[in-house]
Image (cartoon, coloured by chain):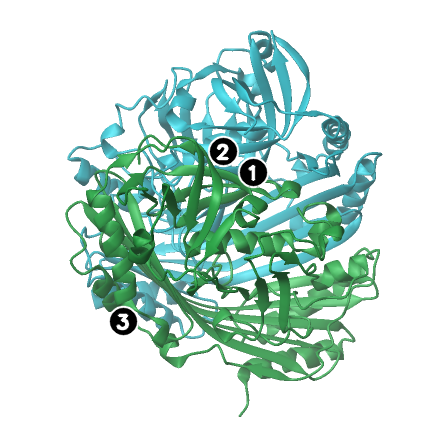
Chain colours: A cyan, B green
Amino acid sequence: MKQAIQTQIERMAARGATYADARWYPFEDQSLLFMWNGNLKEFNASRESGLGVRVLYHGAWGFSAASQLSDLPAVFDQAFDNARAAAERVTFPVRLAEKEALQAQFHSPNRIDPFEVPLGEKINLLRKLDEALTQPGVEQRAIWMNFTRKQIVYFDSEGSEIEKTIIEVFPGMRVMARDPQGGMQSRKFLPSRLGATRGWETMDEALFLEQAGRIVSELNQLVVAEDCPRGQRSVILLPGIMFLQTHETIGHALELDRILGYELSFAGGSFVRLEDFGHLRYGSEKLTARADATLPNSPGSFGFDDDGVPAQNNLLIDKGLLVGAITGRQMVEEANIKAHRQIFAGSSGADRASSFYRVPIERMTNINIDPGSDGSLEDIVRNTEKGVILDGDKSWSIGSNREQFHFATDIGWLVEDGQVKGVVKNATYRGDTLPFYNSLSAVGGPETWEVRYVDNCGKGQPSQIMQLGHGVPVCRFDNVTVGE
Amino acid sequence: MTNPVIELLEELRWYALGKGLKLAIFYHEEQSRLTRFANSAVSLNTSEHLVRLRLIAFEGQRKAEFDLICDPADTASLRGAIDQLADMVALAQPLSYQPTFPVYPQRISDIRAYDEGLAALTSEDRLAFFNEVAQGLESADVRLSGIFSSGVTTTAQISTANENSQFFKVSDAKISVVLSSEKDKWEVNAEQSAQKKSDLNAPALRADLEFLLRCYQQGTPLSLPLGKYRVVFGPAASAEVLEIMAGWGGSGGAMKRGFSFLRPEDVGRQVLSPLLTLVDDANLPELYGQPADEFGVPRGRFQLYEKGVFQGFLWEQDDADEFGEQPTGHTLPSMSLAVAPGSMPCANLEQLAALPRTEDVLYIPYIHYINIVNPSKGLITGSSRFGALLLRADGTIAIPYNVRLTQSFSDFFGERVAWLSRETVVYNTSGTYGRRIPTALRVPRFLCVDGIEVSHSNTSY
């Protein structure tokens, strides 16, 4: 197959393509076990295989994908024909930033392949956890384990050939119950990425059992809690919601394709403009954010992106100042030319596709907030006059240019005069992105920093769901509207 | 004439029977095309031809599933999946209830919603359509974006219970044309849905765009004061909210688990405005209705709300099995929702702007990034996008920056509904996360509601 693909790429060049690449997925396997109230509702396996081809012709992209590979030339010809048709309407011919042609491999670090673990062992663990969640006050309980394993072989007309094997484990559990008003309350445990690997060995049974007790206890407090009061106060975001805040209002806002208007028909744009790089005060001096695709234990690390560019660790926001973006080869060229200056030295290696049948676009890697110097959660609470600690993503909605947002969280704890005063339910907060980050008044130390995974990031047309990560500390923001 | 899809399913059925396996086989094939525009150019032109198989094995109260995207000619892999599934189902934990094994009562072959003309559209056709819509509307500042997404979706089902099979083939298209200002960052759009080629109407799209463009280029932008407004929603806004309310709020399983804003005692009660009648009508090919669901349960005209009175919950097969209810033909990825027309004659934006008014009216065509804040209260949130207008009482038009609405379904569709337009449109909400799922709703061109609260107002585009 490899030779046949190489031959087709050479044929595209002979037909006049200035660039072509292909991603062959010999397999992408998934195993999902989902237990609801003790019933194994989902006991699924899946396998996808196929080929995606991208061709650049006269400055325009064409893409084609197929699961039927008996007629390989037809898949390439379709991509070529699509590019040729697209070339009829070009305003800014696609140019690709320089990169090195690589012969390389990447294997995500793991000690135990979850697909080699007997299904019976996995089901037994689900049962144990379900028993642990079966406690007074719990009406609904859900536990899931989602395992993925994929092999991607990448070729391009510049001479690269890169083979990647990536394994991931996405587990979680959740308990729910109704409050006296009939409102559904919920607590969940989504483990942060501990250690340096991503295989079955990360399924720490003792940790899950311990956390089962915690979420049940917090749920029972929630159902009898008062509503989160309306008004302005400081919000102290734990990693279980800070990761999503970062995702939606730093990550998506700094995707260069959005900034350049390539997502306006669906996902939206960004309030950030090219002239803002190096000048815009995105947040207070306590805010330093980076795109780090080199973390070993996160799904936002993949070795090489789908342009064949190696993973990198780049600053996005340096002490509050906007300095970088999430980029691929095409967009950095266009941005530099449109800005009449070199903003970007090259691709940051963030062009990824969710599957063989989707085209690579700018995607988050691991968008992290550096830990600060404000100590532990207890230290931050001690220095908070009127606030609320928030945790757990319940709902999220963001303006089309990522300029404003509304989040609801699973749980809140009121803080008055440096003391935690008790649980509140139906907590929400909203704000405008730039004023919000400029109100960042405390960033927790390394002891509060956790790597959280995201397995459902949607973007693009045709739509794509991507996996990535966020390393974030506890953060406090002041004068935030809550409870609406 | 033989059908190669059914032949493939029959071959797999015989293989499963040979192994003594109770197997249901679900086939999905898509030939999707998408031409995407950005910055006044074609930014992407794609084709995807994918075959998916979902295999579900049953053994007593156990079941297990294997999904594939595969080459259907790769018989060894297909048989290997069935072999693996046979091992899996033996390991599965028995459910606390008896899952239904689908027994298809009759052979069905339904291609009413397939149109050869739409299926045969080329890249050149899509580009020509866009060029016709946008001709003369672009400038150095005003750039064209959008999509022309079209596809042919074939689905089929069979099980080892008998030789009956179900076969459906449909064509669908969605066109979204966006004009945006590079300098000011505003954006306006116009959308169209097609099930057949003759549904395509470039001049209608162009008329909406021209009107909005004129408003945005001439109007004064403003940050809207917070408070309550009379709001007219466009078809995209109505369709998205209705779809969430009907599918998730009306689900019997969600109700039983405490995730619906509706309770059993709401059946027969006035829940929404008497002006609102909502039906899931499987008889309408333009809404991709089909005569049976994926488990072979017959589908027809399922009344959800009759003049605002809630008629009953939807029961998909697994929920019906678990809670001892009768399935209602809703084991399928999308419904065919249709809202009965209202009485206000108002067919387009020009007519809306010309309607007499004694107060300011906010027009919101589209709600961006809707999410459910509180499921049991039916509370959702989202922001306006793509061409909101403030139709002032004095007849002038201002341009509001985007606003946030955090409101319940009863706020949207309850007693404060003022009117629905007499004209309805088909709005395509086809999903493309993963597989293509042709979906469309028939909704009023305009829906007017009083007392909608603006809780957040942007201070710029």
Residue at disc 3, secondary structure: helix
Please state if A331 lies on the left or on the right of B266 as rendered: left
Q: Which disc number belongs to residue A395?
A: 1
Disc 3 residue type?
Asp
Q: Position of residue A42 (x, y in %)?
A: 70, 55
- Whole-percent x, y for residue B360 in the image: 36, 41
> Is there any visible trace of residue B47 in the rendered image?
no
Question: How far separated are the C-alphas under marks 2 and 3?
Answer: 41 Å
Closer to the camera, B354 or B54? B354
Q: Quick one: SS at disc 2?
A: strand
Examine the rendered structure and indicate whether residue B438 appears above or below residue B104: above
Q: At which x and y percent is residue A2?
A: 41, 62
Q: Say if mark 2 contacts mark 1, CB within 8 Å.
A: yes
List the residue tagged with mark 2.
A406
- Residue drawn at 29 percent across, 40 percent down: B399
Chain for disc number 3: B
**Residues at marks 2 and 1, CA–CA distance in whole angstroms:** 8 Å
Q: How many marks?
A: 3
Residue A445 in the image: above or below residue A342 = above
Q: Identity of the amino acid at label 2?
A: His
Residue A126, label in figure: none
Q: Nearer the viewer, mark 1 or mark 3?
A: 1
From this viewpoint, is residue B122 visible?
Answer: yes
